[in-house]
Image (cartoon, rainbow, N blue to C red):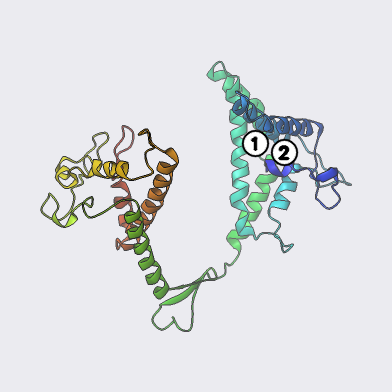
Amino acid sequence: MITFFLFTPKDNNWTPYVRPPTSARLTEALNTLRVVLQEVDTEDWQTRIKAAIASVLRALWYERWNPTRSNPFVDPTMCFIAVFFLKPTGSFETASGVPYMLTRLVYFMRCLVLLDAHKAKTSQADVIEQVNQLHVHIEEGQESTFAAVWRLQAYAKSISMSSIGLPRVWYTENGRKHFTELHYKNRHFSLANYARWNHQLQQNVMTSLTELGWDEVLAIPFNSGPTGSGNLLDDAECSDVYYSVFTELENQQAFGRRASALLEKLLKMPGFLNAEGRPVFTRWMRWFDAAAQGERNLMLLTLNNEGSPSRATEHVNMLVANTETRQRNL
C-alpha cells in the first residue's frame, strides 16, 4: 500500500494513471518518507524509516475524509482497495477473495492506535487515556477510514458466505473408474504423475547427499541401531533443555565420530580453505545453501512416505531440541 502512494509517474504526468486523492498532511509525510528511503546508509535509518512510515499511516487513517457531490471517492485507502482488487481483465476480485486483505488492514489500523498509545506512556493510566482519545479512529459507526473498511469487510464476508461455491474437485473420464485422475482448482492431478514426482524427489535427495560429501562411511546404520530394534531412540517424554534425538546418550554409539567426520572430510576437500588455511566463506555458503535445499527435499520426502498426515508433527519435531519455554513432541 505504501508503494502505491509513493508512485510518481515520469514528468509528473498523471493522465494515463489513477491518481489517488491526498491531503497536505499526507503529501508532507510521503515526501519525508522518500527522503528517508534515499538515506539508507545513515546510522539511525531504521528508526527514521519506522517513524516515517507511521507518519504516513497516521495521515491516511487519522484523517477524516469527507466526500462531496463532485468527489465522492475521496479516501486514499478506499482508492487503494479498489485498485488492489482490480484484475488485468478489467473485472474485480470475487467476494471470497476480499475479506482476508481487508482484515489485515483493520488489524494494522488497531496496531497503529496501540503503538501511539504506548509511545509516550509514563504509567498504565496514561495508556488508557491515550486509548480513550484515539479509539475514535478504530470504532464502528464513525465517519472514518476504519469504519468504511470494516463495513466493506462485513459486506464482502456476507456475500461470500451466502454464495454457492463452484466445485473444486472433479474427476476426468479416464480417472473416474478407479479414481486415479482428477482436476483440483483447474489443475490436473494423477497418481501416475505423483509416483513419478516422488521417484524424482528420491533421486534428488540421493544426489544432494552425494554432492554434499555424504557416503557410506558417514551414513548412520539404521538397520542395526543401538536399541536392537533397528531404530534410533527418541524419548518423547524427556523435557530436558537442548534434548533431541542427536543428544540422546543411547544414540551416541550409532553416531560415533560421524558428527565430526563430515567436517573433517570437507576441510580436506579443495576450495573450502585457502592457501593460508583460512575458510573460503563463499564456498561454505554455497555448501550450506545446497545442504538447506537437500534438507528441504528430505523433509518433503519423509512427509510423503510416512503413511499418515498425523505423523508429520513427530518427524518434524525429531529435528528440534527442547528449550526452556517450548518442549518438543507435544
The quadrant of the rendering that contains the N terminus is: top right
In front: 23, or 130? 23
Find residue 140 and report its image quarter. Answer: top right
Packing grade of label 1 (10 A; few <14, some 14-19, many >=20) is many
In this rendering, the answer to whether 159 lies above or below 18 is below
Point out the tag, 1 or 2, that comes first from the N-terminus: 1
In this rendering, the answer to whether 301 lies above or below 50 is below
Find residue 281 and report its image quarter. Answer: top left
Left or right, 172 with respect to 260, comes to: right
Question: What element does badge 2 sit on?
Answer: loop
x and y percent of residue 154 in the render?
A: 63, 51
- Which labelled disc corresponds to residue 138? 1
In front: 207, or 225? 207
Find residue 20 and report its image quarter. Answer: top right
Question: What element does badge 1 sit on?
Answer: helix
The amino acid marked with disc number 1 is Ile
Left or right, 237 with respect to 46, comes to: left
* Residue at 12% from the left image edge and 49% from the top image edge: 226
Distance Cα–Cα, label 1 vs label 2: 8 Å
x and y percent of residue 228 in the render?
A: 10, 53
In front: 248, or 29? 248
In this rendering, the answer to whether 129 lies above or below 294 is above
In front: 293, or 228? 293
- Which residue is at the far right? 70
x and y percent of residue 218 in the render?
A: 23, 50
The amino acid marked with disc number 2 is Ser
The residue that disc 2 covers is 144
